[in-house]
Image: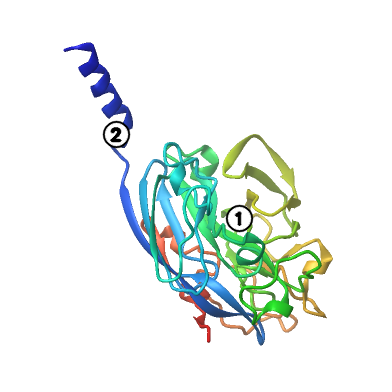
Amino acid sequence: MAVAELVSVVAVLASAPAADAEKRVFNMTIEDTTITLVGSQKFHTFAFDGQVPGPLIHVAEGDDLEVNVENDTTLPHTIHWHGMLQTGTWQSDGVPDTTQPAIQPGETYTYRFKAEPAGTYWYHCHVNVNEHVAMRGMWGPLIVDPKNPTDTDKRVTKDFILMFSSWDSAYADKPGYGGVPGDVADFFTINGKAFPDTQPIRVKKGDFVRLRLIGAGDELHSLHLHGHVFQIYAKDGHPLPAPIQADTVLFGPGERYDIVFEANNPGLWMVHDHIDMHTVNGKTPMGGIMTVVEYDEIPKDQPFYHWAHKQFVPDFYYEESLKQPLGLHENPAFKGTPAP
């Protein structure tokens, strides 16, 4: 075989997908959608598939992804796949006027890239991120399962995704505005909901629990878990060589932390942002970024317990979707209504 032919064959083999890689094709829309943060506080969003957060995209390391995105709003948008390396596919990085033209109203754009590296990632708009991401709900989770799971990965029995964001109610019904210096956020959410409209994190004694924390908004957060010591296991999708033991973790916009803990202390345990101004709904205290780790072994009908008789909404943390076969998973719990 001639040298030129040999080089050509090697190049083809090097560029070919791995034998166990899958090609996965997804279709998504961007829609003007009204969601409710808590109580009667509504907000006009630009929602992926009409939900905030957007659908879970759960794939395997090395998969080849093709995502067709249709813009059904009246403003331009893109999707940036935050943390994906885009090796050889820089045109799919989703930055307007740098890697692509923005997707105009009524248009469809196709992203093609390989899912790597493995870990906890997310996707979000990259047009006017100060508004579209910081206060219009244009974000969703992207989880890439590793080819070679670590011992910690293998131990996980309960897996939860928590996306944190902030909102300025002054712009709730003013799409196209907001996200500028001087704005003051007054609502704070986990997965688009503020306490008491968040949901408990349900575990049982003996579970090994992973919380995937994603800073989707424009604020710092300081998450504190009562009753347990957790390990800070991964940063921005990458396992740490020496996990840190803690009960509080500080993270900012765009950052992800995977924290893991043993469910070894049955009770009803508060989880909250220790930046106290983030535990309000407007001017009302005891709201915002708060939830509870509920053990199955503890009765929930305690007369003092806020959620004693509240209907539980499953999959609020994508915990059920993460158990499903790999793919794109919409979530009825996050669906809004078409915005006027």
Looking at the image, the residue that sits furthest to the top is 2
Q: Say above or below: 314 vs 115.
A: below
In this orientation, does residue 294 appear? no
Q: Quadrant of residue 283?
A: bottom right
* Left or right of 51 in this view: 200: right
The answer to whether residue 262 is seen in the rendering is: yes
Please give the name of the residue rendered at 67% of the width and 73% of the height, measured from the top-left corner. Answer: 177
Q: Amino acid at mark 1?
A: Leu
Which-is-in-front pick, marks 1 and 2? 2
Q: Residue at x 73, y 79 (%)?
A: 170
Residue 41: mark in rendering: none
Answer with left or right where residue 251 lies relative to residue 334. right
Q: Indicate left or right for 61 with 20 as reference.
A: right
Which percent across, then down, holds residue 219? 74, 60
Label 1 sits on residue: 211
Colouring chosen for the image of the structure = rainbow
Dot 2 corresponds to which residue? 16
Q: Position of residue 35 (x, y in %)?
A: 57, 79
Crowding at mark 2 (Cα within 10 Å: few <14, some 14-19, many 20+): few
Query: Looking at the image, which residue is at 39% across and 41% down?
Result: 62
- SS at mark 2? loop
Q: How many marks?
A: 2
Give above or below for 294 relative to 1.
below
Between residues 107 and 312, which one lies in front from this camera angle?
107
Residue at horizontal 50%, vertical 69%?
315
**Coordinates of residue 181 in the picture (x, y in percent):** 78, 64
Amino acid on which disc 2 is placed? Ala
Give the quadrant of the N terminus. Answer: top left
Q: Position of residue 13 (x, y in %)?
A: 27, 28
